[in-house]
Amino acid sequence: MNEHPEQADDNNDSQIPVWLLTAMRLHRQLLDFSQNSSAENPDELFMARCGTVGKIARLRELRNQIGFLPMPFWEYVDGLAKLAGVARDVILSWGGLTDTTSWDSYAILQMSRLAKTLGLEARETALLLRMSVAQRVGVAPAACLLAARRDPGATLVTKHLEEWEAALSQIELDYSPDDLADCQRIEREVSAAY
């Protein structure tokens, strides 16, 4: 047994629930913040952050129940939020974002990190973000694209991911240079987040 719990080895972290590790990390950040600021009541700040952690954990749990759905990123996240009863501003704040319209590298990286926190895989995240670009460009909804290319015998999620990736790759051939740059930025930032 380790006599110094503050020096616990990293192997024990895999046995601790993600939400608890997140709460402990936030508590350490709050202590650092309260020691370096004039916050009147750090306990209120901590409780607010714990409430946010609980809401994000609820979103993650719901995402695990629902799974991946092919739609633009913010439609997917907003759908989870509505089902979980979580306001969009909570999600934006947690993700370090101010709005849902920015497509610069920072915003894409933060959306990717948010998706990872929610339990999405890198491929799923990239697809959701690429579908957002397709929606912005004015392409048909993803379900229509997929239906046009669907292999009737395909049942595995991985197979569907491959179909969606192939459909989007075809569509992206007609994108403007700016839209293509957004897609390349998505691939780069998703890789960085994962």
Image (cartoon, rainbow, N blue to C red):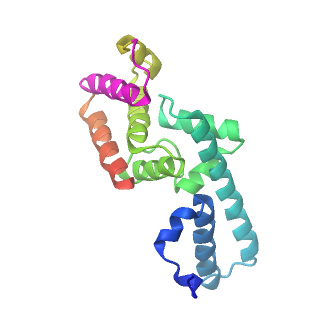
Q: Which residues are magenta?
A: 152-174
Between 141 and 192, the residue placed more toward the observer is 192
Q: Residue at x 41, y 48 (%)?
A: 108
Is 177 situated above or below 120? above
Give me the residue at 69% from left, 41% from top: 84
Q: Is residue 140 left or right of residue 45?
A: left
Query: Magenta stretch containing residue 145, yes or no?
Result: no
| Residue 186 drawn above or below residue 176 | below
Q: Main secondary structure of the magenta part?
A: helix
- Position of residue 12 measured from the top left corner of the image (x, y, whole percent): 52, 70
Q: With 59 as the anchor, is 74 left or right in this view?
A: left
Q: Quarter of the image containing the N terminus?
A: bottom right
x 37%, y 26%: residue = 159
For the point 62% across and 51% down, the residue is 56
Q: Quadrant of residue 33?
A: bottom right
Q: Position of residue 36 (x, y in %)?
A: 60, 84
Instruction: Classify residue 161 by image quadrant.
Output: top left
